[in-house]
Amino acid sequence: MTDERIEGAVTGVNGKLKSGLGNLTGDTKLQLEGKFDQVKGKALDYYGRAIDQLETLSDRAPEDLRGPVKTGLDFARRKPLLTTGIIAGIAFLMAGSGRRRY
């Protein structure tokens, strides 16, 4: 289990507690913060799962590719927001390149 998954679980539980406390007290700001933390926790958990899967796949990669893959995974662990932005940008470019323009 990676740090991202642990942090995601803790953030999600914290969000549930905040949301529940907000419901009890009628504090809508606390409710919203709790919901946001729950979503953030799930996102961190999914990100950690993706990194774990990629690490498992990299172990099966040919020997000459393992070094660059490990370097990329280390970068992804250190800078998750930047990595997510890069992947989103690549997905956006790929989606746009598949369209026909008339």
Image (cartoon, grey):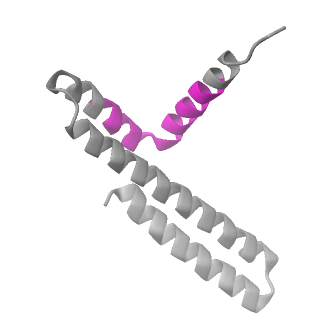
Residue 72 in percent (x, y) is at 34, 31
Residue 14 in percent (x, y) is at 55, 75
Residue under the image location 67 percent in, 18 percent down? 98
Q: Where does the C terminus fall, quadrant-wise?
A: top right
In the image, taking residue 71 as reference, residue 10 lies left or right, namely right
Residue under the image location 48 percent in, 55 percent down? 46
Quarter assignment of residue 16: bottom right
Name, please, the residue furthest toward the right: 102
Q: Is residue 23 above or below residue 59?
A: below
Residue under the image location 43 percent in, 63 percent down? 7
Q: Where does the N terminus fall, quadrant-wise?
A: bottom left
Residue 22 in percent (x, y) is at 73, 83
Residue under the image location 52 percent in, 68 percent down? 11
Instruction: Tell me which secondary structure the magenta stretch mostly adopts.
Output: helix
Look at the image and give the residue range highlighted in magenta: 71-92
Q: Is residue 57 or residue 73 the one in the foreground?
A: 57
Q: Is residue 32 or residue 59 the one in the foreground?
A: 59
Quarter assignment of residue 54: top left
In the image, taking residue 69 as reference, residue 64 lies left or right, namely left
